[in-house]
Amino acid sequence: MTTTASPTPAGLLRWLVEAPPLLPCPSPCRDAGELLKREYQLDPDLPERAAVLLQAHTPARRLGLMFEQWVSALVDASNNLERVASNLPFRYQGRTLGELDLLVRDHLEGKLWHWELALKFYLGTAQAWFGPNSHDTLDRKARHLFDQQLPRSTMPEVRAQLAKQGWQPDSIALLSRGRLFYRQHTPTSGLQPHPGHERGWWLPSNVLDDSEWSIVERPYWPSPFMSDKSTTLIATPTLIDYVETRQRPLMVTQRHRDTPGFIVPVSWPNT
C-alpha cells in the first residue's frame, strides 16, 4: 500500500515551532514553545539550520524519539538556547527515579530550564481520550507528566545529583504537541486540553462512504499534509480491509477535508 511521502524537514520543524500546545501548563510550569517561538521570531532561518543538523543523524524509529531529535535540533541551531543535557537518568539507593528529557540554558533570561516533551494523539469518546493504542489515555499521560515527570527536577535527590555537575535548574517547562480527534462525543471529565489544540476527526470502518483516501504513516502524523501531491489514493473497500485485518487505527487524509482523521476497527477501543 502506497504511503505519504516524507515531509520536508524544515517544514516539519516550522510546524513544531508554530503549532499550538496540546496540554495546558500547570503553574509554575512554563510553555517551552514560547521560547522556541521567541527564537524563531528573532531568527526566521532557524528551521532551515535545524534541518541541516538533523541530516547528520539517523532518524529514530519511534515517533516520541523523533520528536526529541527535532526539538534538540531546534535548540542546537538557536542563537540563545543551549542544550546542556538530554535524557538524564537518575537513581537513588538502587531505585530508578526516572530521567529528565532536556536541560536547556536560556542565555537571554539567564535561566537553566528543565524541559519535558510530549507528542501525543488521542481520539475522543464519551468515556475518555484514547490513543490509537487504547491502553494509552490522555488522563493517564497527563497525570504522569504533571505528577512525576515535571516535578522530577525539584526532588532533593535529583537536585543533589545535578549539583555535582554544576547544574541547578531554575524552572520547569513543558513542550506538548499533537492532535485530538473528534466524533460524536467528547469526554467531559478529566483533564481538559489546551483550548487552541489542533483537531481532527475519526470514524469506525463500518460507516465509511465510497471515497478515496491517503494513508498517513506514523512518522508523518504531526504534519499529515506535508506530502507529495502524487501520493496514490486507495478506495474505501481496500481501506476497510486494511484496518480490520490489522486491527489498529489508521490515520488518513481526504481531499475534501482540511484536517486529518483516523479510521478505526469496529471493535475499537476494545481492540
Image (cartoon, helix red, strand yellow):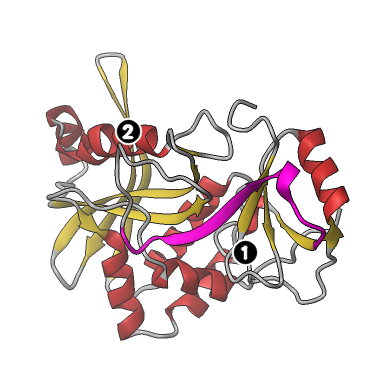
Give the residue at x 85% y 66%: 232
Q: Position of residue 141 (x, y in %)?
A: 38, 36
Secondary structure at badge 1 equals loop
Q: Label 2 neighbourhood size at 10 Å, few (<14), some (14-19), many (20+)?
A: few
- Res. 224 mark: 1
Q: Position of residue 175 (x, y in %)?
A: 34, 55
Near-viewer residue (143 or 213): 213
**Cα separation between marks 2 and 1:** 27 Å
Q: Is residue 62 magenta?
A: no
Residue 230 in view: yes
Residue 52 in view: no
In the image, is residue 79 above or below residue 216?
Answer: below
Secondary structure at badge 2 equals helix
Residue type at tag 2: His
Give the residue at x 61% y 66%: 55
Give the residue at x 32% y 83%: 41
Depth check, mark 2 against mark 1: the one in front is 1
Q: Is residue 205 magenta?
A: yes
In the image, is residue 38 above or below residue 164?
Answer: below
Tell me which segment is drawn in magenta.
195-211
Query: Relative to 191, is 127 on the left or the right?
Result: right
Pointer 2: what residue? 144
Instruction: Name the quarter where the C terminus is drawn.
Output: top right
